[in-house]
Amino acid sequence: MIKYKADDWLRPKVEIVECERATDSSVFVNGKRRAKESANERYLDSFDEAKSWLLDRADRRLQAARNALQRAQDQLGNIKGMKEPQQ
C-alpha cells in the first residue's frame, strides 16, 4: 500500500513510501512500526493531503514569526520613547 510521508524536519518534503500494512495509528515500513502522526512526520493517503499538512505547518510558523516580529517592534518603540526618570 502506498502512503505519502510528509516530513517537516529541517527541510519539508514528501516521499512516497511502500507500507506493508496500516492500522488507525501506525504504518509498517520495512517491517518496522511507525506512528502515522508524530511531531514532524505524517503518513497520509495522498500527495495533496501531505502538501496541505506541510503548508499548514509552514503557515503557522510564519504567523508565529510575524507575531514575534510585531512584539519586538513594539518593544523597540517603547525603548526608543523612554525618557529619563525624574527624581
Image (spheres, rainbow, N blue to C red):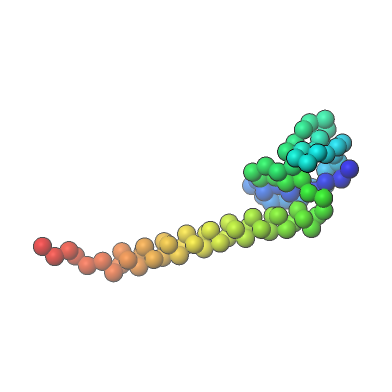
Q: Position of residue 5 (x, y in %)?
A: 77, 46
- Name, please, the residue furthest toward the front: 24
Q: Position of residue 50 (x, y in %)?
A: 76, 53
At 67% from the left and 42% from the top, the residue drawn is 38
Does residue 2 appear to the left or right of 50 in the view shown?
right
Q: Position of residue 51 (x, y in %)?
A: 74, 56
Q: Quadrant of residue 84?
A: bottom left
Q: Is residue 41 above or below residue 59?
A: above
- Name, please, the residue furthest toward the right: 1
- Name, please, the residue furthest toward the left: 87
At 49% from the left and 62% from the top, the residue drawn is 67
Does residue 51 appear to the left or right of 62 in the view shown?
right
Give 22 or 56, whichever is nearer the viewer.
Answer: 22
Give 13 or 6, whichever is nearer the viewer.
Answer: 6
At 87% from the left and 36% from the top, the residue drawn is 20
Does residue 80 appear to the left or right of 61 in the view shown?
left
At 89% from the left and 43% from the top, the residue drawn is 1
Q: Is residue 9 above or below residue 31?
A: below
